[in-house]
Image: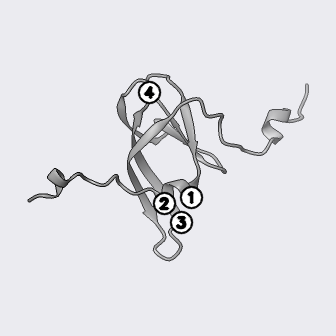
Amino acid sequence: MNLQPSSSLLRPSRPAPENGRFDLLDVNALQDPGSGRIVHLYSLVARCLCCEVVFKAQEGDGLVSTSAARVLRCPTGCGEQAFRGSALRQWRPAAQGPQALRG
């Protein structure tokens, strides 16, 4: 009986290879007010640029956290993309057009 851990368990965590692209539409996270560091990521809303599906991802349901990044997966299987914490901290909603600004 081999009690040695497999070599795959000893490798440092790295973001998954990116084989998909997404537009982030919303980032729902708890951030530290002083540093801006994401304390907890509740969900991401994204649009897959391959199949155009818009979806909400949560941990374990389209979103996987690793030590290096958060990996977003398309629910239709198109692909996945890793987002580093710095990219999520800097995310801002797209500017609304002039029509959306009128009251």
Q: Amino acid at mark 2?
A: Gln
Q: CA distance from mark 3 to mark 2?
A: 10 Å
Write the residue at 53% across / 66% down. Answer: 37
Element at badge 4? loop
Q: CA distance from mark 1 to mark 3?
A: 8 Å
Element at badge 1? helix
Image coordinates for residue 59, horizontal then vertical, percent:
48, 43
In this orientation, does residue 17 appear? yes
Identify the residue under disc 2: 90
Q: Amino acid at mark 4?
A: Pro
Asked whether disc 1 touches disc 3, contact meaning CB atoms under 8 Å apart, the reply is: no
Closer to viewer: mark 4 or mark 1: 1
Q: Earlier in the sequence, mark 3 or mark 2?
A: 3
Tell me the tag on residue 37.
3
Element at badge 2? helix
Whether 9 is drawn above or below 84: the answer is above
Tell me the tag on residue 75.
4
Q: Seen in the image, is 12 located left or right of residue 89? A: right
Element at badge 3? loop
Where does the N terminus fall, quadrant-wise? top right
Tell me the tag on residue 33.
none
Write the residue at 56% across / 37% down. Answer: 81
In this orientation, does residue 60 appear? no
Q: Seen in the image, is 8 located left or right of residue 96? A: right
Q: CA distance from mark 4 to mark 1?
A: 24 Å
Closer to viewer: mark 1 or mark 3: 1
Q: Earlier in the sequence, mark 1 or mark 3?
A: 3
Q: CA distance from mark 4 to mark 3?
A: 27 Å
Q: CA distance from mark 1 to mark 2?
A: 6 Å
Q: Earlier in the sequence, mark 4 or mark 1?
A: 4
